Amino acid sequence: MFIEIGAFEAKAKLSHLLQQVKHGQCYTITVRGQAIANLIPTETSMHANIVKAVERMRSMPKIKGINHETVTSWISEGRR
C-alpha cells in the first residue's frame, strides 16, 4: 500500500522515509496533489522481506488431522 506524501515533507523527512522503505513501506511523492514518483524498496530488500515472511510462516505450528481431501471440500463449500 502506498502512502501519499508531499515533496516538501518528503525532503524534510527523507532519512525517516528511507528507514520505512527499508522495512517494506511504499510512498507516492506528490507535487500539488499530483503523483510524481514512487519511493519503493529495491528488489534486494523485497527479497529479504519475503525470506523473513516465509521463515515466520514455517515456524508456525502445523495443524494436525487435516488432509488434502478436507481442504478440497472446504474450498468446494466456499464456492457454492
Image (spheres, rainbow, N blue to C red):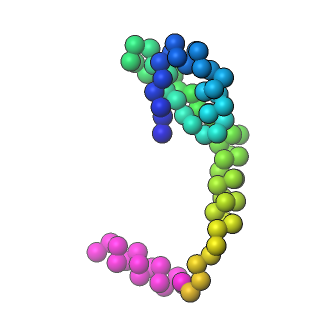
**Is 50 a magenta residue?**
no
Tell me the magenta residue range. 66-80
Q: Where is residue 24, by image quadrant?
A: top right
Dominant SS in magenta: helix
**Is 76 a magenta residue?**
yes
Instruction: Decide: is 4 above or below 65.
Output: above
Q: Position of residue 55 (x, y in %)?
A: 70, 59
The residue that appears at 57% across and 27% down in the rendered structure is 39
Instruction: Decide: is 37 above or below 41.
Output: above
Camera sees residue 9: yes
Camera sees residue 42: no
Instruction: Decide: is 25 above or below 17.
Output: below
The residue that appears at 54% across and 34% down in the rendered structure is 26
Q: Position of residue 54 (x, y in %)?
A: 66, 58
Q: Position of residue 73 (x, y in %)?
A: 41, 82
The residue that appears at 67% across and 66% down in the rendered structure is 58
